[in-house]
Image (cartoon, rainbow, N blue to C red):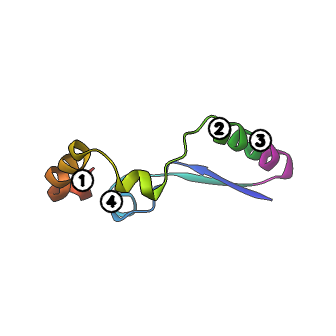
Amino acid sequence: LMVSVGSTNFDIRSFRLNDEASLNVYHGEFAQRMTETFERDLQSSTPYSYLMWKNRPWSERLSETVLLPIKSQL
């Protein structure tokens, strides 16, 4: 099993400008511990659906529109 742990985001800014790091670990016991941690985090997370996004408040939509010109910097 393999686990990848790190700060890398899959966007142009992260790959070209930011200093990002990831560590790939090939170790069964470590992978199991990370899977358990992920499952615990998943239990305490809040689901967010496309329908919820589509019906988000107008204030969020306005913020998104205002911030659109600097989206790549965020």
Q: Name the residue beneath numbered marker 1.
A: 73
At 25% from the left and 58% from the top, the residue drawn is 72
Callout in the foreground (3, 4):
3
Q: Residues within 10 Å of mark 1 (few under 14, many from 20)?
A: few
Mark 3 to mark 4 CA distance (whole Å): 31 Å
How far across and how far down the image is residue 67, in percent? Answer: 18, 51
Tell me which label, 4 or 1, sits earlier in the chain: 4
Query: Quadrant location of residue 54?
Result: bottom left
Q: Residues within 10 Å of mark 2 (few under 14, many from 20)?
A: few
Q: Name the residue beneath numbered marker 2.
A: 41
Q: Residue furthest top?
A: 44
At 19% from the left and 57% from the top, the residue drawn is 68
Amino acid type at circle 3 is Glu
Q: Is residue 32 magenta?
A: yes
Mark 2 to mark 3 CA distance (whole Å): 9 Å
Q: Is residue 15 left or right of residue 26?
A: left
Q: Is residue 9 magenta?
A: no
| Magenta extent | 26-33
Amino acid type at circle 4 is Arg
Mark 2 to mark 1 CA distance (whole Å): 28 Å
Q: Can the viewer see residue 19?
A: no
Q: Residue furthest right?
A: 29
How far across and how far down the image is residue 33, in percent? Answer: 79, 41
Q: Tell me the SS state at disc 4.
A: helix
Q: Name the residue beneath numbered marker 3.
A: 36
